[in-house]
Image (cartoon, grey):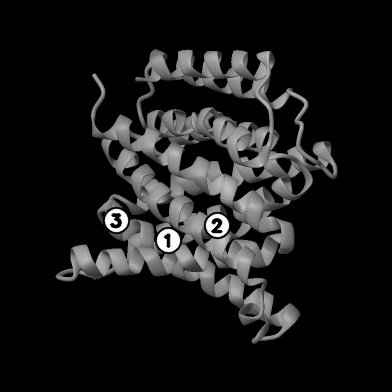
Amino acid sequence: MIGIGEISALMAALFWSIAAVLYKMGLKDMKPFPAVMVRTTAAMGFMFMLNIVLHRYDLTIPLMAFLFLSLGGLLRLLLGGYLYFRGLEYASVSRVLPMIFTFPIFTMVLSRLILKETIGPGVVMGTILIVSGILILSREKASGSEKDPKLGILFTLMAAVCYALSIIASRAGLYYVEPLWGAFISLPIPVMAMYALFSMDKGPAAAFKLDKRSSVLLALGGIFGMGLGSYMFFVSLTNIGTAQATSLGSVTPLFSSILAVKFLGERVTSQLLLGILVTIAGVGLVI
């Protein structure tokens, strides 16, 4: 039976796919590190305003929630986000997105070892099928322009490990707060760290002189991906657990491939369709 947790994970996948297309468009005139800073800052502002509107009566931050969610945010948004954007810089969306979603395997193992979650055989087999489909997708030769596909894949796999560790830390933080507030709490420390690092390299005013078109695209991507996508994923984590939520969220390549064809001129071939079908079969087992 499909419940709120499953629906939320699939909604997160859709929002992440929309964000990926916006990121790829925004990276044409901006380097990866300032791009990560722009998208995260936009997501933080959006999530804070959303919390003010919906939860104005209680904006307290428990210490343990702050520590775990900030750690998760640093791993996901600062380190993982930077590596992910480097991957997009060197390879196409249709190659990078499938590879980034190999992180369910890492997450499943870590959730069992660290969080002591019980993982059923359906989730295990479904996750294996999903990742198999993703690997089929990643072998497809992309039609978009690419600087160095091998280097792009290396950066992307490193980002996947960071994402897995981030999910474990975030799940621990969500024991203390509800998902919407948790999605905001995970953002301020990464934003401050990014601004400090960028200012040390380029100067304090450089962040306000970035390309406007790219900044708008990346900001919109941050709202969809780090804002709405993270919120829906956190809802899923609290309802169905780490392994199942992560596996379902990894169907993002299904949506991103369609969007990349529509907006970025990338093509869908028979191998890409095979990977999508295998991925969908895995989703059926996880649900």
In the image, residue 236 lies at what x, y percent? 32, 38
Disc 3 marks which residue?
180
Occupied quadrant, residue 269: top right
Left or right of 212: which side holds 86? Answer: right
- What is the secondary structure assignment of the residue under circle 2? helix
Q: Earlier in the sequence, mark 3 or mark 2?
A: 2
> How far across and down, in percent of the image, does residue 116 sit?
38, 33
Alpha carbon separation for disc pair 1 and 3: 10 Å
Quadrant position of residue 223:
bottom left
Position of 135 relative to 163 (above/below): above
Picture coordinates of residue 115, whole percent (x, y): 39, 38
Q: Who is closer to the viewer here, 183 or 259?
A: 259
- Label whose residue precedes the other's in the sequence (2 or 1): 2
Q: Amino acid at mark 2?
A: Leu
**Residue annotated with mark 2:** 77
Q: Which residue is mark 1?
A: 186
Most extreme residue toward the left is 57
Q: Nearer the viewer, mark 1 or mark 3?
A: 3
Question: In which quarter of the view is residue 98 placed?
Answer: top right
Label 3, label 2: how far apart the Cα atoms are: 17 Å
Q: Amino acid at mark 1?
A: Ser
Is 190 or 217 nearer to us in this picture? Answer: 217
Assign the N terminus to one quadrant of the image: top left
Can residue 109 be seen here?
A: no
Q: Position of residue 267 (x, y in %)?
A: 68, 27
